[in-house]
């Protein structure tokens, strides 16, 4: 009889240890993968992550409301008078200071894209009924101008401009 370890090939022993370790690591990954994968967003959630919209559906002076991530989004095709009024009010005393140019994409100033939830309690404001030519939240009396900036009322911030980009001159992707 050989004493333990005597007469065995050390390369073979190393190979067995490496093979056993690799098999254990593979089994560990196979066991943990379903748990990690379950943390990924569901397919229906990923589908709502971004939405495309055709701007030709909105006429000058009109607004379309679309749904994105369960929230209303206002896509407004502003008239030249609305744009002029918004720019003229850039220097007004605003509770949440922001210029009109910061709220639109350069070269496409006529289109204003906003999340249509009042920043006070999440109500949906209506257009054209406010004191500043923009939106009015009838629930608590917040007034927004033609750029979606808060002008008066309990809302602490401007209507949110979501992340969006132009895919071409007539199509945008929100999100």
Image (cartoon, rainbow, N blue to C red):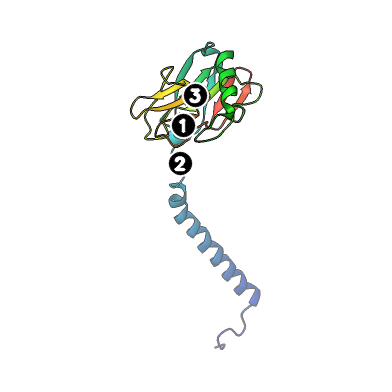
Contact check, label 3 and label 1, Cβ < 8 Å: no
Neighbour tally class for label 3: few under 14, some 14-19, many 20 plus, Cα within 10 Å: many
Q: Secondary structure at mark 2?
A: loop
> Residue tagged by mark 2?
41
From the viewer's side, name the closer residue of 51 and 24: 51
Q: Is residue 78 above or below residue 97?
A: above
Give me the residue at 63% from left, 18% from top. Answer: 169
Q: Position of residue 59 (x, y in %)?
A: 53, 10
Q: Secondary structure at mark 1?
A: helix
Q: Secondary structure at mark 3?
A: strand
CA distance for labels 2 and 3: 37 Å
Labels 3 and 1: the sequence-earlier one:
1
The residue singled out by tag 3 in the image is 145
Residue 100, by quadrant, is: top right
Earlier residue among tags 2 and 3: 2
Foreground tag (3 vs 1): 3
Q: Nearer the viewer, residue 29 or 3?
A: 29
Q: Vertical placement of 81 versus 8: above or below? A: above
Residue 127, horizontal then vertical, whole percent: 43, 19
Query: Where is residue 79 drawn, in percent x and y?
Result: 56, 13
Between tags 2 and 3, which lies in front? 3
Numbered disc in front, either 1 or 2: 1
- The residue lying at 33 percent from left, 28 percent from top is 139
104 or 120: nearer the viewer: 120
Q: Residue at x 46, y 51 (%)?
A: 36
The residue to which callout 1 is attached is 48
From mark 3 to mark 1, how far is it between C-alphas?
A: 29 Å
User: Quadrant of residue 31 in the image?
Assistant: bottom left
- In the rendered view, does 1 fall on the left or right side of 34? right
Q: Determine the residue positioned at 48% across, 59% down.
A: 28
Q: Quadrant of the N terminus?
A: bottom right
């Amino acid at each position: 009889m050989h004493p333990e370890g005597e007469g065995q090939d050390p390369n073979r022993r190393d190979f067995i240890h490496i093979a056993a370790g690799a098999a254990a690591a593979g089994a560990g990954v196979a066991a943990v993968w379903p748990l990690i994968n379950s943390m990924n967003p569901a397919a229906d959630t990923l589908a709502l992550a971004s939405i495309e919209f055709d701007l030709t559906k909105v006429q000058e002076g009109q607004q379309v409301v679309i749904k994105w991530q369960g929230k209303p989004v206002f896509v407004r095709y502003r008239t030249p008078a609305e744009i002029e009024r918004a720019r003229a009010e850039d220097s007004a005393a605003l509770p949440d200071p922001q210029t009109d140019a910061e709220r639109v994409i350069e070269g496409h100033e006529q289109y204003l894209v906003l999340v249509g939830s009042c920043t006070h309690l999440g109500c949906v404001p209506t257009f054209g009924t406010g004191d500043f030519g923009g939106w009015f939240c009838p629930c608590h009396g917040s007034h927004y101008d033609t750029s979606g900036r808060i002008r008066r009322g309990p809302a602490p911030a401007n209507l949110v401009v979501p992340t969006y980009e132009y895919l071409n001159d007539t199509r945008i992707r929100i999100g």
